[in-house]
Amino acid sequence: MADSETRFIFITGGVVSSLGKGIAAASIGRLLVSRGFDVQLQKFDPYINVDPGTMSPYQHGEVFVTEDGAETDLDLGHYERFTDANTSRASNVTAGGIYNTVIRRERRGDYLGATVQVVPHITDEIKQRIKLMAESTEVDFVITEIGGTVGDIESLPFLEAIRQFPVDVGRRRCMFIHLTLVPYIGHAGELKTKPTQHSVNELRRIGIAPDMVVCRSESLLSADIRRKIALFASLPVEAVVSARDVADIYQVPLVFRTEGVDDYVVSEHFGLEAPPPDLGAWEAVTRRASEATERVRIALVGKYVKLEDAYLSVVEALHHAAVHHGCKIDVEWVDSEAVGEQVVAEKLAAADGILIPGGFGGRGIEGKIHAARIARERRIPYLGICLGMQIAVSEFARHVAGMQGANSTEFDLETPFPVIDLLPEQKEIADMGGTMRLGADPVKLHDSTRLRELYGEAVIYERHRHRYEVNNHLRRRLESAGLICSGTSPDERLVEAIELSADVHPFFVASQYHPEFKSRPERPAPLFREFVGAARKAARAPAAQAPGRAPASA
């Protein structure tokens, strides 16, 4: 960079929600990284929860866990996957977190008897969180996404804060990008710009003039439509970007590059000099994904399958692994409460791989245990994550180790064999939010295990989000029956991963940690990589060569 000053890019949204501000922010971040800049991204969420950790996945989608143990918005997963830079607890700020901080200061008397107000106290705290991101990481760019839609009451303090921000750091160090919708009206046979005009006007009414307008649409915007939007937004035509729909989110940075987004941001707006973007590896990933024709069926067994965003990082990690192997993943969404039904059991038996992700609560647990049993007995490649590992242990205990009724104390306090139990340090905790085992911890991989072989390292660092662990009092009995504890904490007090011998099963591995959070398009998580590889091998094998497997037509 030409100097040491951090530049700030603010991304807002209008017209409707779910336009893809997170993908847009991540894509711009990818382009800047590919030009040699250091970038950090940040998400401001307008809800009053301090973080999404206590929210239902149906309300919010998945909770993404950062390296330092913050429970955050799922957009942070996009940020990490696109820029390959770890986020932190400073990367996700909620209205609840802001108000909580200000109220605690007021209770301490920090404001010296002043009346505490949204302006300046709330807005000052919001601005401080933006500056903190720049100061703590010393990056070239901080990209801040404002959640919600312009015009929402909840978002107003955040919009007011970023309106004020150029006064603090200088207008030349700030850029405002507004994402809107240009809908196609079928009966009229044309794209309509009026919603974008109204959205830009609403942003101006708040006091923010956008420096770029990114327009979501089904197809490429014509030159006439761009000029019309540019005229109403008081922008040069080059600052109106056509964000057309694409089949793969990882193509968005390439679309933005074609639209000249990074050139306009770097050269036109900020006046910086930088080499052209190096997108060779990224282009190779997207090309490999689009050219793949071989298909692998993965049955994902969960309780929130009606909302795919509840398992977003898991699905993305599967696709990363598929690209590595040159195939495509067909995810079969299986409701764990319906696993006992014959048709669902047949669907599981016909899958090339079975995956049970994380989750909480007792609903659907027996269905998951049944799914794990199908995978084990029919030798279908199995990957369990967090709860998925606890399910695998409970199933093995019941049907192999002779522990009838084995379960987790989370679901059955009276179980005769509590093979999964609450962490000792968790037993006195009353508060729900942010109190689990969270963030990256070291995992020791044991010699002569599949896990050690596929990672190629003796110690790895993976992220956690859970309260329960394998019960050490019953661990030896499980191991005597053939369960391999292939990963533990360095002091071997906690079981981090289990597996079955290759002689017993082609691929049956589960981890207490969440490998999906560290998977990248260019570098898939090892557990997912090998799981998909095993499933691909199963897909290629005739049913007669896979003992216990149901034929593909089942």
Image: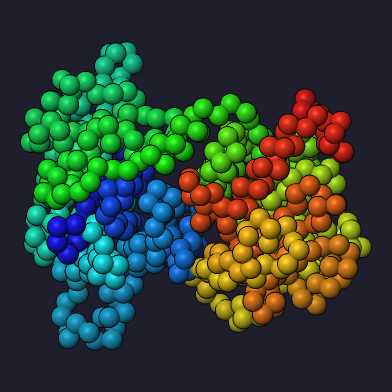
Q: Residue 44 location, x and y as percent?
A: 31, 57
> Left or right of 335: which side holds 98?
left
The residue located at (42%, 42%) in the rendering is 281
The residue located at (17%, 26%) in the rendering is 226
Vertical comparison of 14 with 93: above or below = above
Q: Residue 492 location, x and y as percent?
A: 70, 77
Residue 362 in view here = no
Q: In the image shown, does 12 or 270 lie closer to the viewer?
A: 270
- Which image quadrant is residue 96 in? bottom left
Residue 402 in view here = yes
Q: In the image shown, does 244 or 398 lie closer to the viewer?
A: 244
Quadrant into which the C terminus falls: top right
> Left or right of 390: which side holds 289?
left
The residue located at (20%, 26%) in the rendering is 193
Q: Residue 518 location, x and y as percent?
A: 51, 56
The residue located at (16%, 36%) in the rendering is 239
> Left or right of 59: which side holds 168?
left
